[in-house]
Image: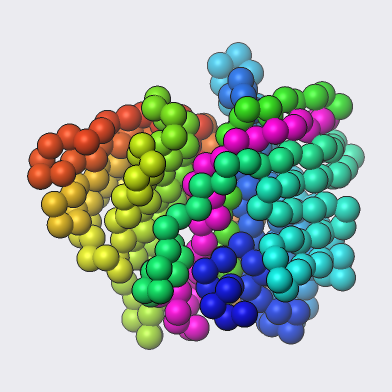
Amino acid sequence: MYLKKLTHPEYFQGNKHKKHYFEGWYYKFVSHDESVTLALIPGVSLTKDDTHAFIQVFLSETKQDQPELKTYYFRYDYSSFHYHQDRFQIQIGNNTFTKSLAKIILKQDDFSLEGSLKMEHITPIKSSLLVPNIMGFFGYFSFMECYHGVVSMSHQLTGSFIINNQPVIFENGKGYIEKDWGKSFPKSYVWLQSNHFTELGTSMMFSYATIPFLKREFKGLIANVIYRGKEYRFATYNFTKVVKKEIEDNQVSFTLKKRTYRLEVKASTRHQINLVSPRNGKMIEQIKEGMSGIVELALYRDDKLIFRDLGNHAGIEIMMK
């Protein structure tokens, strides 16, 4: 089961006896007309005095060419969380999440969300014995503060949600799934994601963070790009170098070099909102995220341009100076 979990990070990685532990899945849905972006984050927080399950909602609706951002936090008794050992399926209350389905019934005084979406043509990342998941050989270490998994770089959506009594059609929209687990998010990091590029099928995710490691720390990088069915991986564990970086409050720029390949990444966002994040398993921190950002990619080999493209509806978190 250890290797199964290692190569399938979507499985529940923890157990019900852990302490100072969190685990959360990140589902992102963009409607076909691109007017609504919705992120659902189901998860668990296992602590000494505040163990619970949760579903965090991040809603971005474009109105008069401007995104309107809202977040909601649904709290559940931990007893309402159920998972399967032999496949990926979690249940929180009446809500079901798998790799191919999200079935939701959420209601608060000022917000309601109900319906189901199917996810088809899942795009997993490449893996091997040495690189069992997006973390590479770091995934084998049992003492990391935070672990990251990519479930699907991009997929097609079928179905609809009723949001605040208004139907939103996600038919032929796009989705993305990833997750995190461990004790705490990195103390400083940059995270980017988009699969809405000019050329269909292009997708990317990027993470650059300060990583605690054996009483020291280092800057860890993971960047994954899929272009015309080919995956380009830039990461600390495959000896990628960050040859240039510029980080500001609402925009970042990185240049990465791996042997003969060079990846240039620029991202910016104007609209962000606070989301709840973990510290020592407790959901007590705040991070800022936007889902209406822009990411520009340029990939070269031997200084010859392979492609250049612009991605919209980008998820962007800049928690680093």
Q: Nearer the viewer, residue 60 or 121?
A: 121
Whether the magenta-drawn stretch holds residue 302 is answered as no
Is residue 154 rendered to the left or right of residue 49?
A: left
Q: How many marks?
A: 0
The correct choice, above or below, for 304 with respect to 198 in the image is below
* Magenta highlight range: 138-164
The residue that appears at 19% across and 56% down in the rendered structure is 258
Query: Residue 204 lies in what quarter of the image?
Result: top left
* Residue placed furthest toward the top: 64
Is residue 111 rendered to the left or right of residue 5?
A: right
The residue that appears at 52% across and 61% down in the rendered structure is 149
Q: Nearer the viewer, residue 313 or 170?
A: 170
Q: Nearer the viewer, residue 34 or 267?
A: 34
The correct choice, above or below, for 217 with respect to 162 in the image is below
* Residue placed furthest toward the left: 302
The image shows residue 29 at horizontal and vertical percentages of 63, 37
Can residue 26 be seen by looking at this rendering? yes
Identify the image quadrant of the N terminus: bottom right
Q: Nearer the viewer, residue 64 or 104?
A: 104
The image shows residue 43 at horizontal and vertical percentages of 70, 61
Identify the image quadrant of the C terminus: bottom left
The image shows residue 208 at horizontal and vertical percentages of 36, 57
What is the basis of the colouring in this image? rainbow
Q: Main secondary structure of the magenta part?
A: strand
The residue that appears at 81% across and 45% down in the rendered structure is 104
The residue that appears at 68% across and 48% down in the rendered structure is 100
Can residue 176 be seen by looking at this rendering? no
Whether the magenta-drawn stretch holds residue 139 is answered as yes
The image shows residue 91 at horizontal and vertical percentages of 81, 60
Query: Residue 248 lies in what quarter of the image?
Result: top left
